Amino acid sequence: MHTSKALWLPVIYLWILGSRPVSFWVGGSASAGVNSQIDGSPVDAAFFQILLVAGLCVLVHRGRRTLAFLQANLSIPLLLYFFYCLMSIFWSDYPGPALKKWIKAVGDVVMILIVFTDGQPVAALRRLYSRTAFLLVPLSLLFIKYYPDLGRGYNQWTGAQMYTGVSYDKNILGVTTYVLSLGTVWRILELLRADEKSPHRRRQLLAYGTLLIMAVWIFITADSATSIVCFVLGTGVMLATSVKFMRRKPAAVHMLVLSLAVSVSLVTLLGGSAVATRAVGRNPTLTGRTEIWADVIPLALNPVVGAGFESFWLSPRVRERFAVLMPGLSLNEAHNGYIEVYLNLGWVGVVLIGLLLANGYRRAVKAFRCEPTLGALLLAYVLTATIYSITEAGFRMLGANWIFLLLAVIGAGSITTGVATLAAPPPDLVPGLRVIHAPARRPTRQDLAGNILCRKTT
C-alpha cells in the first residue's frame, strides 16, 4: 500500500527522540544543566521548529481530511489537559521557556495526526514502526557491543557502567525499546493471523522475529527494570486478548485489567512492594526514587495549580534544596509521572491526567471490540503508560511513553468512530473483520477523516 511521503516527518521525529539530540549527531554535545532547560540548544530548537512547521503544513494541506478527523476523534480530556498546560504558563516564574516547551509538546500531537490522517492510516502505522524500530534497535545493539564509547556510560548515582545504546541514558533506551517492541509484537500477531499464502509473510515474520530477539537482548543487557515490566505486561495483555474467549466476551477485558490493577494495589497496600522490587532486581527504595519522592513532594510551590508547565525544576529554591540533600547530583525530574505532574500542574493536572488515562482506556476497549489485534496494542499502551509512570516521568513531552500514550488515545478514537474511508483497504487489512464499503455518494466530512467502518464477521 502507498503511504504519504509526509510519514517521514514522524519517523525522523522518533529517530531523534529515541536516540540523541541533533546537536550531538552534528558534532556538538548534548547540553545539560539548568541553563539548557531554560535556553536549550539553538540547533535542537531549530530542528524541532522545522519539523513542527512542516508537520503543520502537511495537516493544512490535507485540509478537510484533517478537520474531519479532529471533529470525529477529538479527545476532550486531552484537549483540556493541553489547554490547562497553556494556561499554567501565566503563573509560571519562567513563562518564556514554558511556552517554548508547550509548543514542542504540540509537536507530539502533530506527528501523530500525520500518521492517522494518512490515506492509509493502518499501513502508515505499520511503516512508522518498521522505519523506526529497524533503525534504533539494531543500532543500539551495535553501539553496545562494538562501540562502547557511544553505547555505554556510567551511572551518576553509583558510578557503575550502564548500557545506553543509541540514546544517552539507559532509561531512554529502555522506554524506546519497549514501545517499539510492543509494536513488533503487534505486527507478528497480525502476520500469524494473516493468510499463509500472503506475499512476503514468511520474510516479514523472520524480520520481525529477529528484531524482537534483538530487543529482548537489549532488555537483558541494559537492565531497565521498569521497561522490562512494561514490555512483559503489554505483551501479556496482547496475548491474553488474542484468545477467542476474550474476543467473544469483551467484558473479559475489563476483568483482566481489573485483576492487574487489584494485584498492583494489593502489593503496594499490603507492604509487598519491597518483595516486588527485589523480584525485578531492585532495592526497596527503587534505586533511590522513594528518597527523591519524600524530599521533592514538600517542595511543591503550589499544591493546587503547580509551578507552571515544566517550570518546577527551574526554581532556584528547588536546586539549592537538592544541592544540600544530594550533592553532586543534578535532577530534572521526580522519577514518577504523577508526582511530576503534581509539581508542575498541581492536583488539577493530576486529575486531568487521570481523566486522560480513563478516556484512553475506554477508547482502547471500544477499539478492541471493533479491531481486536490493533485495539489490543492500543490497550497495552494505555496500561503500560500508567505503570511506567510510577517510577519514571512518563507524562513529559518529547518522551516515547507519552507519545505512544497519545497515539493510543487518538488512534483508538479513529477506530471507534466507525465512519467509512474514501480509500477503502482490502478485506484482509483487518484480519477477522470485513470492510463495509460506503455506497457511491458525495463524500462527507466524516468520510474524509480516513476511518474504517467494520463489523465482526459471522
Image (spheres, helix red, strand yellow):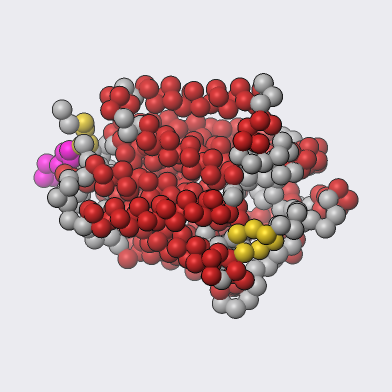
Tell me which residue sits at (83%, 50%) in the image: 326
Task: Identify the residue at horizontal 66%, vertical 55% (top origin).
Answer: 98
Nearest the eye: 385 or 276: 276
The quadrant in which residue 427 appears is top left
Left or right of 275 in this view: 188 = left
**Residue 321 coordinates in the image, percent (x, y):** 86, 49
Q: Check the image and report above or below for 290 versus 62.
A: above
Q: Quadrant of the N terminus?
A: bottom left
Q: Is residue 71 visible?
A: no
Residue 130 position, x and y percent, is: 36, 58
* Front residue of 306 and 387: 387
Q: On the rendered structure, is 98 left or right of 413?
A: right
The image shows residue 264 at horizontal and vertical percentages of 58, 27
Which of these two is toward me, 43 or 288? 288
Residue 382 location (% of width, % of height)? 47, 38
Q: Is residue 17 above or below residue 384?
A: below
Residue placed furthest toward the right? 324
Can you name the residue that lies furthest to the left here?
A: 440
Q: Quadrant of residue 131?
A: bottom left
Look at 20% across and 51% down and name the residue there: 423
Residue 319 seen: yes
The chief SS type of the magenta part is loop
Magenta residue check for 226? no
Drawn side of residue 105 relative to residue 295, left or right:
left
Number of numbered labels in the structure image: 0
Of 337 and 422, the residue lying toward us: 337
Q: Is residue 277 left or right of residue 12?
A: right
User: At x 71% / y 39%, what residue is drawn?
Assistant: 283
Residue 37 image-quadrant placement: bottom right
Q: What stretch of residues is rendered in magenta? A: 434-441
Quadrant where the C terminus is found in the figure = top left
